Amino acid sequence: MNNPKRYTITAALPYTNGPVHIGHLAGVYVPGDIYTRYLRAIGKDVIYICGSDEHGVPITIRAKKEGVTPQQIVDKYHEVIKNSFQEFGISFDNYSRTSAEIHHKTASDFFKKLYKNGKFIEETNEQLYDADAKQFLADRFVIGTCPKCGNEESYGDQCENCGTSHNATDLINPKSAITGNVPSLKETKHWYLPLNEYEKWLKEWIVVGHKNDWKPNVLGQVGSWIEDGLRPRAVTRDLDWGIKVPVKDAGGKVLYVWFDAPIGYISATKEWAEKKGEDWQPYWKDKDTKLVHFIGKDNIVFHCIIFPAMLKAEGSFILPDNVPANEFLNLEDNKISTSKNWAVWLHEYLEDFPNQQDVLRYVLTANAPESKDNNFTWKDFQARNNNELVAIFGNFINRVVVLTHKYYDGIVPSSNGKIDQVSLINNFPKDISDSIEKYRFREALGKLMNLARQGNGFLQEQEPWKKIKDASKKEEVETIMNQALQIATALAVLCEPFLPFTSKKLKNILNLDDSLTWNDIATKKEFIAPNHQINKGELLFAKIEDDEIQKQLDKLQATKTANEIENKVMEPVKETISFEDFTKLDIRIGTILSAEKIAKTKKLLKLQVDLGFEIRTIVSGIAESFTAEEVIGKKVSVLINLAPRKIRGVESNGMILMTENTSGKLSFVAPDSVKNEVKNGESVS
């Protein structure tokens, strides 16, 4: 759509079964916010809509885990998420929730219209059922092997590994997530949206119609799904938490969360319109409105196939113009996991790094997983802040402001026109716009930083601090500083979509109001006028020290250790032996005289052990816990009457006795305290 009258921007509704983390921010909310802020900056009519997704199985699972009701869970996390977004500067026009009365009515009315118009099919078939829990196993209540990629922890409605959406009965070796039981099959009736009837239309609309403007990862996943053949999709569930199916004889069923949730965009728009006294319908029903969904790659199928089919079936709504889904962001080389607490939680970041919202916005944009999965590391976070925001952007602004106050008491000097930076600056708004409008936010941010680099390079080349010493160059220095201030002013305006807190701070330093626009930076020959008084400077960005980063790394290490302990399976007690069997074991104290790593192995050390009566060669799998140097001189307990065995070509004559704790750490059975009291060769009994 070349020139829409208005824009409706939606961001995927976060599940209220936990807080928001950096993966959510990088994939959905930061790019959506950049796009929306940009559209506002160029004067477009735009609304940015989101809200808490408060239905579905993840809510009930979290409630069971915490021993509370689902309503208590959604109330708790709705406030946490909403407040975090607000403090982080995500500028939603309305952040709603699917438990709101207006949403229940909107979703129910949508279902009833499709039901009345015969858009659903009713089927009674067999679904997975946990007899002990007395419950059908919808969605995340069942785990099994994905039929497409073989992931053994796929959910009943979607595999998070490959992104494939499927039915619970498609899983291989399914197990109940409630009891761990192997489920049985039991008949139940549901309403289905016959996606197969929309297959031809979807193919023409997406694969053909959007082949040149949708991202390759989106087209690829949608195309693959369509090529596999679409099947009817159940829009109801046998659950007791959600929006009740609004027809007679529904049997206590609720709407499937992926039928209910995207309608949340519509109900949130209605709620916004009521508050503002606006008409919501043009934002969803006018063909001159551009609808854009910001989502993660795990939501592609729902936003590109299921929701459009729902809208098409309803008949009065516009369809999305684009769905610029991002890939996943990993954390320190591991997949972010809510259940394993392997994440950087937004509310915790805001506590640990107060007033540094823009640092995280910058890093997540500069490292955005736009075309492939990317990795967030705390060291990279520190380096990007210190080497880019502080050393480039912040350094330029600091120098300009300090020199302006030093030379001219903070008053903008005049320009003689012989040095022209403004004509170069005029190109930046269009260049940045081109990238943003193609949803290349990482590229757009790079262009913004090039403007800051241009400012630094200009000052470094002109060296006003040297020329000021020459009275004959007074006018030249004034021009240099005037042009540097023009660059600083342009940065204050153009950085707003990416770094809103920085923009506000910089505008305050430069004593600017909001009258200067994005379009002005593209067209005007002067952005800040001579004789304008600027304010005293302040640091835009602070250097992040090593100890701050180490604190975050320590927190992750603690999480990793806790997960290892939780997942550690204690070995079962072995079968009972007789006392006579035990007396056959000959365990002696020895001292390790030498040790060397066995080539091409990770675990094996070749040891020479003094047993008092002889020196033996023993191969021991302890190299991952100890270096060869560490074990020399150690007292050890040795099982000496074990039959010899060749290991990697070395004959081992005995076994070193070790203990292993729940985190996998090995320790010698003979402690250092026996060093002087016990001689080599003495028996352990």
Image: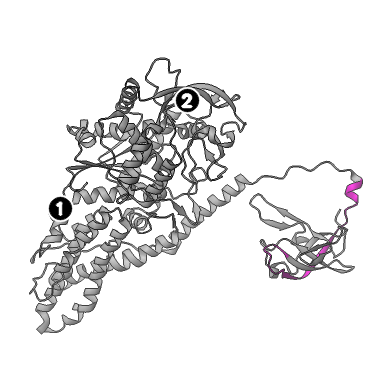
SS of the residue at dot 1? loop
Residue range in magenta is 580-604
Res. 293 image quadrant: top left
The spot of residue 217 in percent (x, y) is 39, 50
Magenta span includes 479: no
The spot of residue 140 in percent (x, y) is 50, 35
Q: How many angstroms separate mark 2 from mark 1 (CA)?
A: 51 Å
Image vertical order of residue 77 relative to residue 414, above or below: above
Q: Which mark is residue 245?
A: none
SS of the residue at dot 2? loop
The spot of residue 185 in percent (x, y) is 58, 26
Viewer-proximal residue, 491 or 144? 144
The amino acid beneath tag 1 is Asp
Image vertical order of residue 596 relative to residue 304, above or below: below
**Lateral position of residue 201 relative to residue 289, left or right:** right
The amino acid beneath tag 2 is Leu
| Residue drawn at 37 percent across, 63 percent down | 384
Q: Which mark is residue 239?
A: 2
Res. 598 image quadrant: bottom right
Q: Are marks 2 and 1 in contact (CB under 8 Å)?
A: no
**Lateral position of residue 126 relative to residue 433, left or right:** right
- Using a 10 Å C-alpha cutoff, classify the residue at mark 2 as few (fewer than 14 neighbours), some (14 to 19) or many (20 or more): many
Viewer-proximal residue, 120 or 645? 120
Q: Is residue 555 visible?
A: no
Res. 144 image quadrant: top right
Badge 2 or badge 1: first in the primary sequence: 2
Magenta span includes 582: yes
How many labels sit on residues? 2
Q: Which mark is residue 514?
A: 1
